[in-house]
């Protein structure tokens, strides 16, 4: 508990159990200093700690017991790992005398978590507690952020065991021997930026006639949105946003061309295909962005700016790269960049953006829902999403303005992430309106956390895109699998309005845009948690769409739904 206070931790998300009971007993004594949120399931706690980290920029903390408690958080650990979110997961295992004997609820969680964490620690000696905790927090938030797991043997947490301990505030942790040792590790701190690499990029920008920028998750994680905006405006180039880059560059900025990749806008995908210089900041060129790496940005010189050297040339071969944090690299570039103008290039690309006003199609549409949210909810509302069609629609039609405003699972694509993330955001940002956008398939995976929302009186508005299907998989079945809708129709309960009421929350059902406008205004004015069930047509699709492995402009489905 004292080590947590060293790191300025005031909030923990978790679920108790037999092996971690000593920590919870001590937590009882610290309840005036450290606030604990008891979720309905360990996975919910893991996503809440992650959402807290993303929304606040702090390190999230999650507690879980051994065995199934520990394995239940592995999805949350992997979600944080793939999206570079700083979370410290703390578990407790069986005692030393039982280790390796298949004791009740024993599992090698450090071994399981090793591929999906920046580091794992198995603490077998009480004397190692301070160093392990300090290293865990240092690793989680330094360099490229990510999750760290610390597993304590139960005997290590025996309240009768005493050790010599000195409280050292986080700001002074680097004076500790264990932290000084870590400082030489590239994972501990951002690498020194090569000034020659910066100069070379400045020359490439000067030579470019059709530059194109890509805002990735690294901009968001480094809170480098102001530096990126200045960079984009000085170059005067269209800017595409990856899924994880939402909030790194204003979604309604005149230079924004929209999302890029499989469900990217025609403006972004065509710009990628025709540009002569592509500068990606904090993007790892995932398979959802660079669908066909061999033809990706085929006319361009590709430049990658990333804090993690391992990401360079991993998915797409580059012509130049700069290793360093997004904010520092962009600051160095901005200091020397003159003002450019690329009028003809912008006039070619930016008009390709889809119209922002929802057309009247004679039915209730996802765009109408999101347009209502955009016009009704506070502009700085934090938005969490689950994974699927609703996620793509949210990125497309909502305009995120700042890092931490969008909480979504990009790399791991975790259905069930949204509710926990919304809980973390609501706890970490009590002054912000929090919206949880989900689908009927996803809500079935995390609706148990409505109990957490109700108990802690978290004013989260959950908006369900209910099309009676696992929509994204059904869309693939429709377009690629000759309409063989195998196990994607959700023709079953629950009734989401009654479900909300069962948890002590208000439930609403809306079938048209007028009802949506009235209901959302009422829900926001009331300031209480609720569930809004939006009934949509089962055949709604996300457009545009490019099939996996195809060229980025080989549209299977074009904007508006026409077949490419």
Image (cartoon, rainbow, N blue to C red):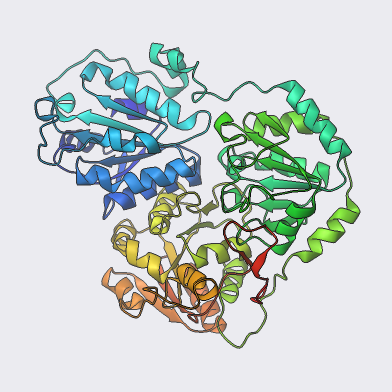
Residue 355, position in %: x, y? 73, 71
Left or right: residue 508 compared with residue 23: right
Instruction: Choose top left, top right, bottom left or bottom right for residue 227.
Output: top right
Left or right: residue 293 compared with residue 423: right
Left or right: residue 440 compared with residue 503: right
Residue 54, position in %: x, y? 49, 45
Does residue 133 lie above or below 205 as drawn? above
Quadrant of the image for the N terminus?
top left
Q: Image point 69% across, 50% down: which residue?
A: 295
Does residue 263 lie above or below 174 as drawn? below
Residue 175 visible to the viewer: yes
Of all residues, the one furthest to the bottom in this rendering is: 362
Left or right: residue 453 compared with residue 139: left
Does residue 477 lie above or below 270 as drawn? below
Q: Image point 49% across, 68% down: which residue?
A: 472
Instruction: Choose top left, top right, bottom left or bottom right for residue 443.
Output: bottom left
Residue 526 visible to the viewer: no
Quadrant of the image for the C terminus?
bottom right
Residue 12, position in %: x, y? 33, 41
Q: Nearer the viewer, residue 242 or 304?
A: 304
């Amino acid at each position: 508990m004292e080590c947590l206070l060293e790191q300025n931790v005031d909030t923990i998300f978790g679920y108790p159990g037999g092996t971690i009971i000593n920590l919870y007993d001590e937590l009882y004594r610290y309840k005036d200093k450290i606030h604990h949120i008891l979720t309905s399931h360990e996975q919910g706690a893991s996503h809440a700690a992650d959402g807290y980290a993303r929304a606040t920029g702090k390190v999230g903390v999650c507690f879980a017991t051994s065995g199934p408690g520990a394995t239940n958080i592995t999805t949350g650990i992997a979600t944080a790992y793939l999206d570079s979110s700083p979370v410290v997961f703390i578990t407790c295992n069986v005692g030393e005398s039982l280790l390796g004997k298949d004791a009740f609820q024993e599992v090698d969680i450090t071994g399981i978590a090793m591929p999906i964490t920046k580091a794992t620690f198995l603490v077998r000696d009480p004397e190692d507690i301070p160093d392990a905790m300090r290293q865990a927090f240092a690793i989680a938030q330094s360099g490229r952020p990510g999750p760290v797991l610390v597993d304590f043997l139960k005997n290590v947490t025996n309240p009768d065991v005493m050790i010599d301990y000195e409280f050292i505030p986080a700001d002074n942790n680097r004076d500790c021997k264990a932290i000084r040792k870590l400082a030489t590790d590239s994972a501990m701190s951002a690498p020194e930026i090569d000034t020659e690499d910066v100069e070379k990029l400045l020359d490439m920008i000067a030579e470019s006639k059709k530059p194109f920028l890509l805002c990735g998750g690294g901009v968001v994680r480094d809170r480098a949105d102001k530096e990126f905006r200045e960079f984009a405006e000085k170059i005067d180039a269209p800017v595409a946003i990856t899924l994880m880059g939402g909030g790194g560059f204003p979604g309604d900025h005149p230079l924004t061309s929209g999302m890029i990749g499989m469900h990217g806008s025609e403006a972004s995908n065509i710009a990628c295909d025709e540009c002569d210089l592509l500068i990606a900041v904090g993007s790892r060129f995932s398979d959802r962005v660079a669908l066909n790496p061999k033809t990706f940005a085929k006319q361009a010189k590709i430049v990658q700016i990333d804090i993690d050297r391992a990401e360079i040339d991993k998915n797409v071969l580059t012509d130049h790269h700069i290793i360093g944090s997004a904010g520092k690299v962009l600051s160095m570039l901005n200091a020397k960049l003159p003002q450019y103008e690329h009028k003809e290039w912008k006039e070619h690309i930016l008009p390709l953006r889809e119209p922002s006003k929802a057309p009247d199609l004679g039915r209730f549409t996802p765009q109408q829902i999101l347009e209502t949210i955009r016009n009704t909810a506070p502009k700085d509302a934090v938005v969490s999403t689950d994974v699927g069609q609703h996620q793509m629609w949210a990125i497309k039609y909502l305009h995120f303005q700042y890092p931490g405003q969008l909480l979504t699972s990009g790399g791991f694509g975790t259905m069930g992430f949204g509710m926990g993330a919304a809980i973390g955001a609501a706890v970490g940002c009590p002054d912000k309106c929090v919206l949880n956008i989900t689908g009927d398939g996803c809500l079935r995976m995390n609706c148990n956390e409505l109990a957490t929302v109700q108990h802690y009186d978290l004013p989260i508005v959950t908006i369900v895109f209910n099309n009676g299907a696992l929509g994204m998989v059904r869309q693939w079945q429709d377009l690629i699998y000759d309409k063989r809708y195998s196990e994607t129709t959700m023709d079953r309960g629950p009734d989401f309005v009654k479900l909300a009421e069962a948890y002590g929350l208000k439930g609403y059902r809306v079938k048209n845009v007028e009802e949506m406008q009235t209901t959302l205004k009422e829900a926001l004015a009331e300031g209480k948690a609720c569930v809004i069930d939006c009934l949509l047509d089962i055949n709604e699709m996300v457009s545009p769409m490019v099939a996996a492995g195809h060229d980025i402009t080989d549209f299977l489905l074009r904007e508006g739904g026409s077949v490419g």
